[in-house]
Amino acid sequence: MAKKTPSATRTRRYARFTAVDRLEHLLVLLSFTTLAITGLVQKFALSPVSEFVIARWGGIENVRATHHVAATVLMLVVIFHLLEIGYKAFVLRTPFTMLPGFQDAKDAWMAFRYNLGLGKSRPQMGRYSFEEKAEYWALVWGILIMALTGFAMWNPLATVQLLPGDFIPAAKTAHGAEAILAVLAIIVWHMYGVHLKRFNKAMWTGELTEEEMLHEHPLELADIKAGLARRSLPAKDLQQRRLIYYPVAGILAAAMLFGVYGFVSGEKTAITTVPAQIATVPVYVPQTPTPVPPTATPLPSATAGPTAETGAGAASPVTWIDVGSLLGARCGSCHSATLATAGLSFATYADAMKGGQDGAVIVPGSADSSLLIQVQSKGGHPGQFTVEELALVRAWIEAGAAER
């Protein structure tokens, strides 16, 4: 029998990733890239590049909708990945080779010394190198942080039931910072280690050549040649484990999918939790002065000095000048020009009167029909008004919600 030539040895290929593994990687790649683009243009909305991207995307609402869809896809991939890990661990009895250990710290130190010219040889890697493990667990950590902070911004009312309202702007800051860190990690670390240092095509072809295995994973290659890797299991044992695992996995999958459904549809914004009543409100209501009870204490911002027309000590009508700064201070963390949750912004008078995705929230002349007053009257809102502030806004709306 003819002996194998060196070229034949180098071209021999070893299976490394299944088609399912590669599909997961592709979905993570697409969803992460989409999240990065649509997220960073919102964080740096005033940048010329962001303005260009948002305009080409069809507007900020389209950008946010795409961001939400990509986040949902990523959550579904995570659920599938967790079920896949359970299948490999329980049914196939696959070792947890991605878990970090003390040997990884030794390999990292050895590689560090070798790269500085202080060591004579590179560390010998097994199934996964310490770099691959670090990158994998960094992804796990990043997804966890982004999910928690994203939930707080996506569901503010549910968040403030458990945490202080200040947690929402803090979550926004952490969400943006983690996004920048993740993008930089991909560009600097992943791009160099996988595409520049040595182009690794295993996530696209599913295979590595023997030369690549010898360079990147010599310990795993030695196990394969010795017949110690990927030992087959009895078909009877596999069948028994599947009969146990599939029902359990189905229940877990249903529970996690229900959680995702609640995540994405439980709450659009605080305003939409109040039943809309705009249809019953007259289109035009004449401006009328709001009577002030004799015992009420006038608010400082709602009073003015004597004028030629009203006489000494008369109260001037409340205008947007009095109310705009209050709305900006109380509601700006969620309804600013750059973060107009559900399309609602209080940055300008025109924005406030325009309303959001569900229509107007201010009905001139009818405070009780205004969603802004309805939400604030319930209490517990992240940007909750004080009693005096609520009275001021109510008086402004009743007086016709004048701009000036």
Image (cartoon, rainbow, N blue to C red):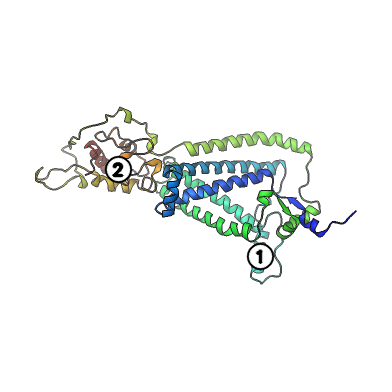
Relative to 141, is 354 on the left or the right?
left
Q: How many marks?
A: 2
* Image height of 138 relative to 157, above or below: below
- Residue 390, by quadrant, is top left
Relative to 357, is 318 on the left or the right?
left
Which residue sits at x=39%, y=35%? 272
- Residue 220, by quadrant, is bottom right
Which residue sits at x=30%, y=40%? 353
**What is the distance, in whole Å, between disc 2 and disc 1 at their CAs?**
60 Å
Mark closest to the chain's N terminus, 2 or 1: 1
Give the residue at mark 2. Answer: 350
Relative to 373, is 170 on the left or the right?
right
Q: Is residue 70 visible?
A: yes
Question: In the displayed image of the protein, which residue is found farthest to the top?
Answer: 280
Q: Are marks 2 and 1 in contact (CB under 8 Å)?
A: no
Label 2 Cα neighbours within 10 Å, binned few <14 / some 14-19 / many ≥20: few
Give the residue at mark 1. Answer: 111
Q: Is residue 170 visible?
A: no
Looking at the rendered structure, the kind of residue marked 2 is Ala
> In x, y percent, where is residue 309?
10, 43
> In x, y percent, where is residue 249?
64, 37
